[in-house]
Image (cartoon, rainbow, N blue to C red):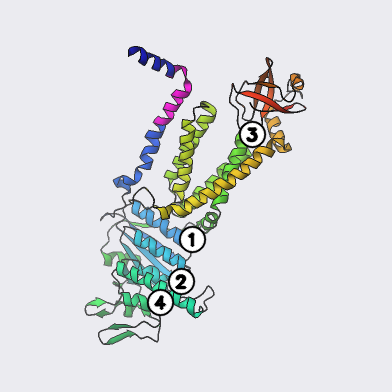
Amino acid sequence: MNTVISLERHRWRDDPSRMFTRLWFIVLLFVAGPLLAADETPATSGAPAPAGPVFIIPLHGTVSDPQFFFLRRALKEAQRAHASAVILDVDTFGGSVLSAMDEMDALLTTRIPTIAFVNTKAISAGSMISLAAKRIYMHPNAVIGASAVVDGTGQDLQKTMLEKETSMLVAKVRGAAKAGDHPEDVAEAFVRKESEVKRGDFVVDSKETLLTLNTPDATKLYEGRSLLASGTAETVEEVMKAAGLTGTVRRIEPTGFESIAYWLKMFTPLLLIGGGICAYIEFKMPGFGIFGIGSVIFFGLFFSSYFIAGLAGWEAVIVFVIGLLLVLGELFLHPGTMIPGLIGVLLMFGSLVWAMVDHWPGTPALPTSEELRQPMLNLIIAILGGSVLIAVLAKFLPKTSIFRHFVLATSSASGPAVTVPVVNFELHVGDTGVAATTLRPSGKATFRGDAHDVTADGDFITQGTGVRVVSVDGVRVVVERV
């Protein structure tokens, strides 16, 4: 038994690749493990704390996808900070119905108590968003309602389409009103003109008009309960006082980059393809240059867009970097071990998908199939598109003058003009030898005992691998793996 243990220890000392493999596993366990399990810790459970901060989120201007990105990011930040409440400072004439529905879903998803402060208008899509809050407070001069569906230019829709959209929207606002303990008939009357709102024998809104409420109407009591709003306030501070909130105030403002993130998200597959292609070309050329910088820019834009959109966090970026380090370690420190490189690739792909999943703090770490659908589609498109382009580049890139320029310029030292041994002229197509260094893609190979400068055609060739000359162009010798 002692002999076996001694031999095993000797094998680890003599084989550096085993040592590096073991080291990468230790790094993976101690760094990636806690990150992947972060959502199970109390610090990110997302539960509100009675003494937690109060987040103020302004929803001003047109309701749009960039505004939804901002709201989702702010709500997740509030949940991570264990906020005691979120106050929405609403002042909008409305906007996109689809964006409003997304914002409603985000408000209904968060675990933090939400309050809508209508300051001073929540019209159309704005009233829908306000209904998704748990409580509503009104500025003395505020109005809320008028959520009928119209087209993008403000014109009425064709009858069948109008009925279809209205029916869907009524179901959405009634569900949100029920979740927030608001009157469902009031929510429906905001959307459907033919709906009637009555309290006892008093008709609040007839079937001939679309409901819009001012502050006195919204706060009027019927049988001891207000029609819609919990109270009146002129400022956010008065809302906090009325709601009994004592936490420190944290105001979250839109960054202005939400619109950029919206457009970048639309081109997600192209960003991933661009990052992969630039990384491939960079690995084919010696040193670190413009293509490496391009790859960093593409992946940086990808993660930045999803971070601004309220999807990706720093965890996804860190896991991606860990995966990249594992791949680089496989290529340059211990080629041929395979396992660290494979784990690194899986971590990189996993972090890309993770960044695109709409995950809320405190929810189960594993996403649902619906949450994975679009991220996986984006990744598959990127992999297929990138594979095709890489195959084309692998075939034609080594033959281009740009590639030759980069390789020769990098491998040539300053001094005499002739830097390549004359023995290169002795090689012919079909000659076989052995790679004396790892070809990434340029390096040295020995033929008949002499060392020659060569360039690999295609993938990297590790040291000690047999090679065959496929072309000789002046002093440039291209080889392939035997």
Three-letter residue code for mark 4: Val
Instruction: Tell me where residue 158 appears, x and y as whole percent.
Output: 51, 79
Vertically, is 78 above or below 30? below
Q: Residue at x 40, y 87 (%)?
A: 208
Task: Give the alpha-carbon distance from disc 2 to disc 1, as whole Å.
Answer: 14 Å
Residue 191: mark in rendering = 4
Q: Which residue is under mark 3?
A: 458
Task: Give the alpha-carbon distance from disc 4 to disc 1, as whole Å.
Answer: 24 Å
What's the magenta region? Answer: 12-26
The C terminus is located in which quarter? top right
- Closer to the eye: label 3 or 1: 3
Instruction: Tell me where residue 239 appears, x and y as whole percent.
Output: 31, 67
Instruction: Tell me where residue 305 appears, x and y as whole percent.
Output: 50, 52
Instruction: Label 3: state its secondary structure.
Output: loop
Instruction: Tell me where residue 2 appears, x and y as whole percent.
Output: 33, 13
Q: Residue at x 33, y 48 (%)?
A: 44
